[in-house]
Amino acid sequence: MTAQRPQCAVCNLGGHLDDELITETDDTRAVIVVVRHVPAQVCDRCGTTTVTDEVAEELARIADAQQGNAVSGTVVVDFDQKQIAAAG
Ligand SMILES: [Zn+2]
């Protein structure tokens, strides 16, 4: 019985993608937005993380929303619950 995990498209190491929860950080603007528990696929060989288009769009929405909620500093958000904890 062979597990049919998707193969990594980035490396040539024969890596496979595992579902994991990762932390994504958007530090391109005044407010640094850290989003935890983001569903992603991680290559078990090269460590490349991949998110779906839907997740990427949601991350962009979250980051955009947080830019309006604070002037500067770091905001930590949970991807699922969108609970906000200010740090720094
Ligand atoms: Zn890989």
Image (cartoon, rainbow, N blue to C red):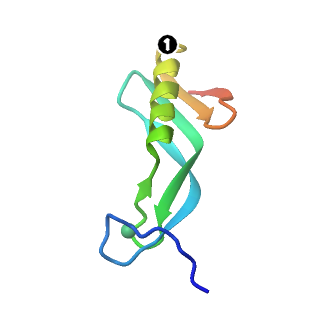
Residue 69 in percent (x, y) is at 55, 14
- The three-letter code of the residue at mark 1 reads Gly
* Nearer to the camera, 82 or 27: 82
- Left of 21 or right of it: where is 7? left
Residue 47 in percent (x, y) is at 43, 64
| Figure disc tally | 1
21 w.r.t. 7: above or below: above
Q: Quadrant of the C terminus?
A: top right
Q: Residue at x 66, y 37 (%)?
A: 80
Disc 1, SS: loop
8 w.r.t. 28: above or below: below
* Nearer to the camera, 74 or 37: 37
Q: Quadrant of the N terminus?
A: bottom right
Q: Residue at x 34, y 64 (%)?
A: 9
**Ligand 1 near label 1 (Cβ, under 8 Å)?**
no
Residue 74 in percent (x, y) is at 52, 28
Q: Residues within 10 Å of mark 1 (few under 14, many from 20)?
A: few
Q: Residue at x 34, y 78 (%)?
A: 13
- Left of 2 or right of it: where is 6? left
Residue 78 in percent (x, y) is at 64, 36
46 w.r.t. 20: above or below: below
Q: Residue at x 54, y 46 (%)?
A: 23
Q: Which of the four quarters of the rendered structure image does ligand 1 lie in?
A: bottom left
Residue that sits furthest to the bottom in the current view: 1
Mark 1 = which residue?
A: 68
